Amino acid sequence: MTPGADTLAERRAYLEEGLSDIGCARCGALVRAGKRSPQQTSVQWTVRAAATCAVLAAAHAAGRPAALVPTCPDLHDTIDRAVRDGRLEVS
């Protein structure tokens, strides 16, 4: 069964709306990030960003899938700083 145009548009909106480009202050990995509440953060990684991130690269080198790495603390700090500085809004 092929999803309808409305379903695809809803999925795209859910995955992309409210996200902004954020570059990690440590390694420069460019991700799309958004905050839907003070406690919730969404991050979309590209293959390039995952390869650039030292935390994800170390996990990969150890044979651990990046999807099982809960977060990169440096990127987390960068996102928190972007919220405090007003560059990323909680929506």
Image (tube, rainbow, N blue to C red):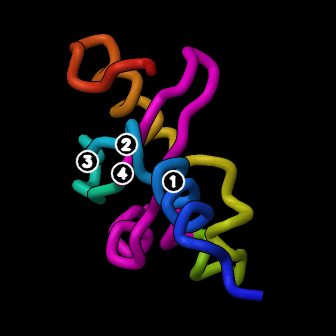
Nearer to us of marks 3 and 2 is: 2
Label 1 sits on residue: 15
Label 3 sits on residue: 21
Q: CA distance from mark 4 to mark 1?
A: 10 Å
- Classify mark 1: helix, strand or loop: helix
Q: Which mark is residue 32?
A: 4
Q: CA distance from mark 2 to mark 1?
A: 8 Å
- Residue 87 x, y percent position in the rendering: 21, 24
* Picture layout, residue 54 above or below residue 80: below
Displayed quadrant of residue 61: bottom right
- Which range is magenta? 32-58
* Picture layout, residue 89 above or below residue 44: above
Q: CA distance from mark 3 to mark 4?
A: 5 Å
Dot placed on the residue nearer the N-terminal end, 3 or 4: 3
Dot placed on the residue nearer the N-terminal end, 4 or 2: 2
Q: Name the side, left or right, on which 80 lies relative to 11.
A: left
- Classify mark 2: helix, strand or loop: loop
Amino acid bearing label 2: Leu
Judging depth in this view, the residue of 5 and 37 nearest the camera is: 5
* Discs 4, 2 touching: Cβ within 8 Å: yes
Amino acid bearing label 3: Asp
Label 2 sits on residue: 19
